[in-house]
Image (tube, rainbow, N blue to C red):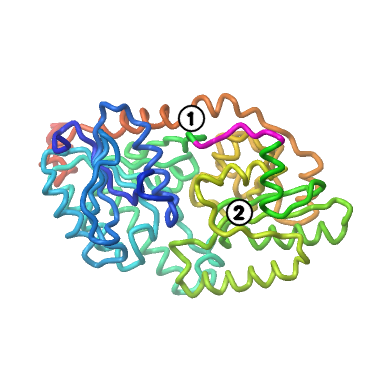
Amino acid sequence: MFNNSDTLAVISPFYSQNRGDFRGYSIARYTNLLINSFSKNQKSVIFSENKENESSYEASENILVVPSYKFNSFGFFSQVLKKVIEFNEIKDYLIQFEFSIFGGKKVIPSFLLSLLGLKVLGKNISITLHQVATNLNELSGHLGLQKNSIKTRFLNLLLNIFYRVVGILSNKIIVHDELLKNRLSEFVESNKIEVIPHAIGDENVKKITPKMVSIAKKQFGFSRKDKIIAVYGYRSWYKGTDWMVKTVKELSDANPKLNLKLLIAGGVSPTLKDTASYKKFDRRLKSVIKKANGSVKVTGFIPEKDVWKVFAVSDLVAFPYRTRMSASGAFALTLAYKKPFLVSNHFATGSEIDLSKNTFELNTSNFEKALSRLKNINTEYLVENRSWESVSKLYLDSVKSVKINLYANIFPKKAYELAQG
């Protein structure tokens, strides 16, 4: 039923609605929304993480979930390829990739071997790179590195090699905006890279009513007079969570009558929480929050069913990023809920949306000025053109447009020369 040439195979973390929440990976949620937006005539097989020796199951009549690989396993390559061979008739593969979603650094060689194995088997390989970071100096505080150190330069070299190898082994690379494409095009042929925007909204987005605002304020412990700035998503250095805490404290101390509060809506990063650098960051963040004199509230992980409460309670959603290495699902939800927002100049860089009137520099006085001149952006056209249904069609058109043969897959340069000659 699922093992045929029209089926799309997807390698990604995935949790169906009937198997619990999306705790752990935002990519699991992303893949769920994408695959469920395909036409019911499009069958999909998801090669997902196998947590407890799970058996395959149908998430819906057109989606088969095949638990395949163990997280952080050297055997990722053999585990995935074993399942691929079982579904020998499927030719189109879409891989969702973000560093650490399959495991730590030790999994990367095995992941690349998986791409090579798919290529040798003559598969059409498309990969969505949710992150493109080509200079780790910009992420030094996030990864616990020293700028321009020998270690950082060496890791930059390995990262660049990784992108080159992915570019050689894949038939199509999908990114979410031009900034990421421009970075990646230093190492990959531009004609292999396609920009498909991050979808906006989902079936859980609600129309916020005054009653819902009241419910959310009560649950999070805010008063009716509080003016609430929210940062939503996993807490991290590159997202500027600690910077936002310090800034709100400074503004609250200087202007107590503003009743300004900060809601940190999100838990620790599931992919980084066990690393030494992240543990150090989290300790510092908790110390800064403690010094904020009650102006900051932290929720921890927000279950999918309660996400609306974050946007109901927020007067403003802020994105104080120190750098940007991916599109932001939280920003897409902010647009879907039509909430006022401010973004750092680092976040705004490379955006196809004009964010100039909603941008601030990472200092308290500039953020305060941005608050005073905040402008709402009309997002109706974005919500309409970036629905999950629209984006899923772009995905299928992109993935299935590639025509391949086994010889061209293994010897692409030689095949090209023969075609020209």
Identified by mark 2, the residue type is Ala
**Residue 265, numbered circle:** 2
Identified by mark 1, the residue type is Arg
84 is within the stretch colored magenta = no
Could you say which is closer to the camera, residue 98 or residue 180? 98
Q: Is residue 292 above or below residue 213?
A: below
Q: Is residue 1 above or below residue 254?
A: above
Residue under numbered circle 1? 386
Q: How many marks?
A: 2
- Look at the image and tell me whether residue 170 can be seen: no
Question: What is the span of residues highlighted in magenta in the rendered image?
Answer: 204-210
Considering the image in quadrants, where does the C terminus appear? top left
Give the residue displayed 47% in from the left and 38% down from the top: 198
Q: Secondary structure at mark 2?
A: strand
Q: Earlier in the sequence, mark 1 or mark 2?
A: 2
Could you tell whether 16 is left or right of 137 in the image? left
Q: CA distance from mark 1 to mark 2?
A: 25 Å
Q: Residues within 10 Å of mark 2 (few under 14, many from 20)?
A: many
